[in-house]
Image: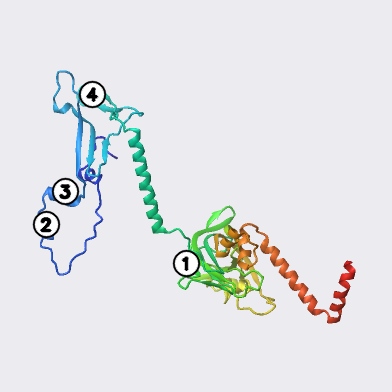
Amino acid sequence: MTPSKASPTFLVERMANIRHRRQERHPVEGNVAKARPVTWEPSEEFVKNSHVINTPVQTMYIMGDLGPYGRLGQKENEHVLCTVKADSNGVITVKPDFNNSKGAYRLETEGEKREVWRLTLENTSAGISQEEKEREQRMYKDLYVRHKDYLNSLVGQDFEMPPPGILRLLVNGEIVSAKGYEYDNLYIHFFLELPNNWSNLPYQSLSGVTQTCRTRSLGKENVAFFSYPFNFEAFFRKEDETEESLPQWPVLYFEVLSLDFWQRYRAEGYGYLVIPATPGCHTLTCSTWRPLQSGTVAELRRFFIGGAPELEDSSYARVPGTFKGDRLSRFGFRTETTGSVTFTLHCIQHARAFVDASSLKKRRQTVLDQLGGFSQQGSVYNVLEAFQRARRRMQEARESLPRDLINTAATLTPESTA
């Protein structure tokens, strides 16, 4: 609580007009200061001058004698109505402020009558002429322009552009929550897999582990709110420009685990998330599963000891990047559906081809140009992929037919169309 009659201290008044010095003092080698470094008995004036960096200020007080008629000139009836301060920088401070359009200030005297006075402060100085006002505005405008040019010289006017033929992908993501799992004290381990033709910065880590979070009841579900942020930056370079198929996007694999009182963990679920091909904000919920081992003994071991079947490679939740065959068989692999994890992703795509295509208004032909069309047409990816699949099926069908039949079909086509 602030007392009703509180007054500012000396330090507060002097710190109101403080101006820190920006001089950098460099000690000279071999030169030892002759002054005493410690003052054992400092005086009051020395303390004030040493602890406060102030600007010289001239102060003027406007006083008022609020005493009754016939008793003027007594010190107890004198009150400070206004304080005017002017420093060496040309700044004038008036306290209290002018109240032309506001209500009057209220002053209450002490004593038997306790009179109440109303104080109004007005600026009656003559205003500047129109010519001086315009000159002042031109001076301020020139000052602002020079300050703007100075800031532009520090920041620069050109954005950082990736090299030609490279797509830059920036993802700022957040692991929002996880729900529907059997045990409490959940945490998530995740890592990002970059397909072919993708790379990242050498010092950037593509994996992480969230904090351990306890669940809370939200409706009929037990939800753990992580709010764990992460970000990464990846670069795509198309080595073969003759290939028309769109690239594969990075995949985020994650594993949900639970921690018990004895610091033993259990695998609660595996899942994956394909980074969206369209820029913007995306909120995605991914379902998870875990390997299931049949039998009562396995469930007792999971409950008491914490042991449970785990995947040696977390990318097996989708199609492993090291898989090179035609078919990936999971016959006989038993799993159990568990909960789900919610992600929020903010994706940004940056490429020089986007700027060239928009400025020259040329037809998109390269892979990077096709990627730039996602911001304007969201279904172009599905259309191009369907066209590539149909084209591959047609080529396979043509290769499987005998050569004589192909020649015959080629000669009959014009007659049938005619």
Give coordinates of residue 157: x percent, y percent. Answer: 45, 58
N-terminal of the pair, mark 1 or mark 4, is: 4
Residue 48: numbered disc: 3
Disc 2 packing (10 Å; few <14; some 14–19; many ≥20): few
Residue 261: numbered disc: 1
Most extreme residue toward the top is 70
Label 2 to label 3, Cα distance in Å? 14 Å
Q: Nearer the viewer, mark 2 or mark 1?
A: 2
Q: Nearer the viewer, mark 1 or mark 4?
A: 4
Q: Give, as a three-letter code, the residue at label 1.
A: Phe
Q: Which image quadrant for residue 126?
A: top left
In what element is the residue under mark 4? loop
Labels 2 and 1 touching (C-beta < 8 A):
no
| Image side of residue 20 versus residue 200, left or right | left
Q: Residue at x 18, y 20 (%)?
A: 68
Q: Nearer the viewer, mark 4 or mark 3?
A: 3
Rendered-image quadrant of the C terminus: bottom right
| Image side of residue 141 versus residue 413, left or right | left
Most extreme residue toward the front is 131
Residue under label 2, please give it: 39
In what element is the residue under mark 2? loop
Q: Give, as a three-letter code, the residue at label 2.
A: Thr
Q: Give, as a three-letter code, the residue at label 4.
A: Arg
